[in-house]
Image: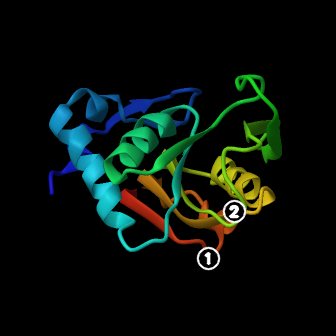
Amino acid sequence: MLDLRRYIRDVPDFPKPGILFKDITPLLADAQAFRASIDGLRDAISGVPCDAIVGIESRGFMFGAALALSMQKGFVPVRKPGKLPVKVVRQEYSLEYGSDAIEMHHDAIKPGQRVVIVDDLVATGGTAEATCALVESVGAQVSALAFVVALDFIPWRERLGSRDVKALIRYS
């Protein structure tokens, strides 16, 4: 497999001083690397029960939609509040300072469906944890979570517990 780490750019002090941001846009800009990431995610979740792919706004849309197409599965976007046009279900969650929320169409996933949640990166795990709760609130099951990058030096595992988490690139 292509070394995807070569396509992850470090951006110091973004979005605030002291943060080393992992920028995935060079990976997206290279067709071979982007294809390898989608193939890698598909391989990582092969054998995992999956009726649909759920992508977290916004970079999770790029990887999730491409993965869903590759697997011939439906794609479900999870968005920030106020972005979806029909009735939604909502999940609020805590941030380091304050709170936020995510939403999904109320009928996007049916009870009993099994989904894989996709995003570009897991750090604190807060948005991924909230997405799991959102999916489960409509009676669906989270089979796995799949990320291009996992920042293992940040304690995201505390939030996601024993859930099945796949990642193509791990930074410890």
Residue 165 in the image: above or below residue 96: below
Amino acid on which disc 1 is placed = Ser
**Pick the front one: 162 or 21:** 162
Q: Residues within 10 Å of mark 2 (few under 14, many from 20)?
A: some
Q: Residue 113 in the image: x percent, y percent? A: 62, 63
- Graded by Cα atoms within 10 Å as few (under 14), some (14 to 19) or many (20 or more), the crowding at tag 1 reads few
Locate residue 33, reporting x and y percent: 20, 40
Q: Position of residue 88 (x, y in %)?
A: 80, 36
Viewer-nearest of discs 2 and 1:
2
Q: Earlier in the sequence, mark 2 or mark 1?
A: 2
> For residue 81, which quarter of the picture?
top right
**Left or right, 156 with reference to 46:** right
Disc number for residue 140: 2
Q: Quadrant of residue 43?
A: bottom left
Distance CA(mark 2)–CA(mark 1): 18 Å
Q: Amino acid at mark 2?
A: Ala
- Residue sitting at x 38%, y 74%: 47
Residue at the image position 30 percent from the left and 31 percent from the top: 28
